Amino acid sequence: MAPQTLLTGTPGLDSVVPMDYRMLGGSGCAVSSLCLGTMTFGVETDESGAHAQLDRFLEAGGTMVDTADVYGGGKSEEIIGRWFASRPADLTEPVVLATKGRFSLQAGAPNGAGLSARHLTRALDASLRRLGRDSVDLYQVHAYDPLTPLEETLRTLDGFVRAGKIRYWGLSNFTGWQLTKAVHLARALNAAAPVTIQPQYSLLARETEWEIVPAALDAGLGLLPWSPLGGGWLSGKYQRDQRPSGDTRLGDDPNRGMEAYDRRGTDRTWQVIDAVQKVADDRGVSMAEVAIAWLTARPPVSATILGARTISQLEANLRAAELRLSPSETAALDAASDPHPADYPYGELGVDQRARTLPGGH
């Protein structure tokens, strides 16, 4: 079941994009269906540009803001903290603030990373100082830590909730089995359980649907997908047989991370891009709007994380809030983006082995 939409639109702001609100996973907290990601703050976006994005996002009815201690080496949190300090409390009150901890800000420190009680306690305290807050709404463990007993991590997070430093906690970049283990161990310990998971998910990264999405649905967790545009590929900025150049992420570094041109520029990628382009042309909207709208409608997405370098990019992405794809458009995008898993265990034959019907077809 997809997260429940509570209401649409923002009272008193006639000029803004309509925004839907959903529950943050299994919690009692409502969030906007689009989330402002802040990884660019202090790196690709300067402070004035970042503050302009935050202002515009709230004006558009957005409420959820996501950051992490490693974004810009702490600069993103500092910029957000100064934004909070410079704005009236009644303007910032709707913000549901999320951050993350796990990775190192101090190279070579043996205890400077991971999900140990020692590191997470120091990481959260440092994040709160940079943000200028007494607490955050959602604290996320940024990735799995194979060296720390999961029980230690869960007891630490439960302690943060009890101390009022965080209201909820979530997972990021966990696999399906890791997610399930965390949920059930938390229940066994009578500790606060995760309410969300933040995975990479887009029309170009649908492998998330093989195990992570079913595990999240089973546990009642909400998804906070990152990279909904596949690192910019689904915005239409890159061309077949033409290596990227100019003022784009891959123009600066064609081998950048998961979206590297030679890694992602496959026949399937171009097939997906063509399908997104067709829907966009037929609707008279941007490719980014189509890709974000497709993802935001997937179960069990609570909020899709938007990452923008400029206010114009943010404006374009926000328009996805009012786009609803038809069943035929969704089906066409599903077909074009099908990752075609091998027969076992995720392909047709493997799925058939797990299927069951009663006599009469029920």
Image (cartoon, rainbow, N blue to C red):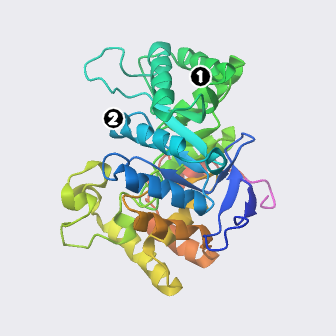
Left or right placement of residue 35 versus residue 67 in this view: right
Asked whether the residues under the numbered discs 2 and 1 touch, taking CB atoms below 8 Å apart as contact, a structural biologist would say: no
Check disc 2 and give the amino acid type: Gly
Residue 66's label in the rendered image is: none
Instruction: Determine the residue positioned at 71% across, 41% down.
Output: 26
Q: Is residue 199 above or below residue 359?
A: above
Q: Is residue 183 above or below residue 63?
A: above
Within 10 Å of the Cα at label 1, are there few (<14), some (14-19), or many (20+) other Cα atoms?
many
Where in the figure is residue 22, as x and y percent of width and height?
Answer: 70, 53
**Which residue bears the numbered disc 1?**
157
Q: CA distance from mark 2 to mark 1?
A: 23 Å
Left or right placement of residue 178 versus residue 274 in this view: right
Q: Is residue 24 magenta?
A: no
**Which residue bears the numbered disc 2?**
73
- In front of the other: 281 or 40: 40
- In front of the other: 61 or 302: 61
